[in-house]
Amino acid sequence: MRAKDISEVMVATVETLDDHRHRVLRALGVTPYGLRAPCRADESAPSAADAGAPTCAPAVDATSACVLVMPADCAKRERNLVEQIMCALGGVFAEAVRVEVTAGQLPSVPSARAYLAFGKAQAHALGRVLPADVMAVAEVLLVDAPDVLFDAAAKRRLWQAVSGLRRQWRDAPPGRGG
């Protein structure tokens, strides 16, 4: 064989091994992470709450959105931690709309496939505002409050809840918002 023929065979072998690796990882339920663009949770960037913007984002398409229901009295450190965790989870979670519960009240909430309520008070406020037809279709997950997420066990519970949600979306039939 000529040198050119050998290099073509080597490239084909490497591509085949890489494809095989991805198939094996997918069969094991492992999604390999790739490099992503920098997260929007930059400390220097002002948040919507700091800029005086309304706390509720405009309505989002229910087939592609996740909404984070946060307490309004959340410290900046806790808010940054939640942003970092969501960016690490990637995809829908990194782009999730954030809404805030102020004095037990929640402004209008966009419809979404999933709602992550950070604490019981936020879950109760969400339950009072969310229409029954949206609540019947969406997943509402109660996770630990942001001030508790500094604990490793709380991060693990959040990861398990989100992993279950991802698995459910991945296995959902095409017509069921998956």
Image (cartoon, grey):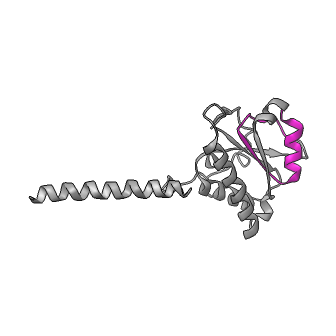
Range of the magenta residues? 106-131
139 left or right, relative to 18:
right
**In the rendered structure, does residue 112 fall within the stretch colored magenta?**
yes
Q: Nearer the viewer, residue 74 or 7?
A: 7
Which of the 4 image quadrants contains residue 100?
top right
**What residue appears at the point 86 percent right and 36 percent down from the top-left corner?**
129
Query: Is residue 55 at all visible to an observer of this figure?
Result: no
**3 lies above or below 166:** below
**100 lies above or below 108:** below
Q: Nearer the viewer, residue 30 or 158?
A: 30
**In the rendered structure, does residue 128 fall within the stretch colored magenta?**
yes
**What residue appears at the point 52 percent right and 54 percent down from the top-left corner?**
27
Residue 2 x/y as whole percent? 8, 58
Figure quadrant of the N terminus: bottom left
Which of the 4 image quadrants contains residue 80?
bottom right
Residue 131 x/y as whole percent? 84, 31
Which of the 4 image quadrants contains residue 42?
bottom right
Residue 46 x/y as whole percent? 65, 50
**100 lies above or below 12:** above
Figure quadrant of the C terminus: top right
**What residue appears at the point 25 percent right and 56 percent down from the top-left corner?**
11
111 left or right, relative to 11:
right
**102 lies above or below 133:** below
Q: Nearer the viewer, residue 120 or 165?
A: 165
